[in-house]
Amino acid sequence: MSTKLLDLVNITKSYDGVTILDDLNLYIRENEFLTLLGPSGCGKTTTLRILGGFETPDAGKVLFNGQDITQLPPNKRQLNTVFQKYALFTHMTIAENIAFGLKIKRKSKAYIDDKIKYALKLVENRSPALLSGGQQQRIAIARAIVNEPKVLLLDEPLGALDLKLRQDMQYELIRLKNELGITFVYVTHDQEEAMSITDEIVLMRQGVVQQVAGAHEMYMDPANSFVASFMGNPPISYVDVQVGGGSAVLENGLRLPCRSDYAGHAKMGIRPEAWALGGDLSVTLTDVEMRGQDQVVSFTLAGQPVRAILNAEEYVRPGQEVHLRLSEKRCYLFNPETGVRL
């Protein structure tokens, strides 16, 4: 287990009376790739800016290796930031952009030249297409890593790239992180991106951390209905049920399998992959969307919309009646008022 490197302790931040971060507590391990994930306005970029020294919290501390750096300016921290807008100097060459921070630190010409070569080698392109589309992003990363930071902060750095290039750059970031052996803290609102590149995800909502876990655990074992809804595409479906006696009963009397000691009214979340063809439940499909080897189908249960992923080997059509079975391993019970997992 890696040692703790960064520690956010009781961080609170407000703008114009609106609370952005509410008593945030979070630690980041050495050599970890941690992603701050959540919808717009959840506080993830503010958290990153506080880590980088670009914002000061109203309350709380930022600790680096146990030392309080809360009031330390960005240039005094062992952290570098790559922003969504790369902030490159258009009047400078690529090498001059990369060397900018080193010149500010008054490093020797020989030292700077050596570091430029090192950085360019680390971010050299694997294909011409990658070079043409992601050049600015790669230069910004090269400029950040020549300073040999302990932590690299990345604020949605791939947001302006097209899908194919973004996927290529995700693999490049993983390679860089492993080769450099430094800690990455990455901000994104894209749950698929977070799940594909990260060691651990911090899912935030309205300035409060909802769950901290690896991608697999967060998807398979969500802490609440917000986490369950945010993780997954297609998203989880919900039906109102009355739980008891090993089953969950819908308003129309339909019984779904449910292993739980809980008894009473609940909201049942059903992952789309929980369904399969060939069961006792008869439904009429309202929509079918092809996704390669899978097909995403829609139907209703007791008037409540449900989406399911079915194998495309047996092709189905809108308006068709099909028989389905449900795996309770992909079903979750939540408090209908609070969303807390039951």
Image (cartoon, rainbow, N blue to C red):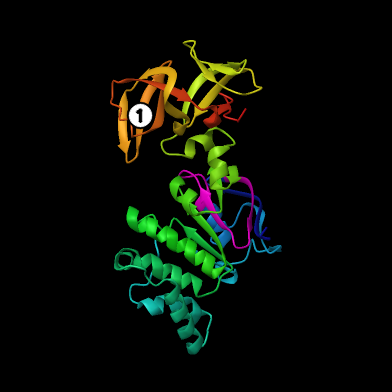
User: Which residue has dot 1 on it?
Assistant: 297
Quick one: SS at disc 1? strand
Give percent across and percent down for residue 168.
38, 59
Give percent across and percent down for residue 337.
57, 24
Residue at 57% of width from left, 27% of height from top? 334
Residue at 57% of width from left, 26% of height from top? 333
Q: Which image quarter holds the C terminus?
A: top right
Task: Residue 137: name its quadrant.
Answer: bottom left
Along the line of sight, which residue is nearer the eye, 136 or 191?
Answer: 191
Q: Is residue 44 magenta?
A: yes
Relative to residue 65, is residue 93 drawn left or right? left
The outermost residue toward the right is 66
Residue 19 seen anywhere in this rendered image of the structure: no
Along the line of sight, which residue is nearer the eye, 70 or 255?
Answer: 255
Give percent across and percent down for residue 263.
64, 18
Residue at 62% of width from left, 15% of height from top? 245
Location of residue 181 with respect to 223 vertically, above or below: below
Along the line of sight, which residue is nearer the eye, 104 or 328?
Answer: 328
Give percent across and percent down for residue 147.
53, 74
Location of residue 156 with respect to 308 vertically, above or below: below
Residue at 49% of width from left, 48% of height from top? 195
Extent of the magenta region:
21-45
Q: Is residue 12 magenta?
A: no
Relative to residue 320, is residue 196 drawn left or right? right
* Amino acid type shown at disc 1: Val
Q: Which image quarter holds the N terminus?
A: bottom right
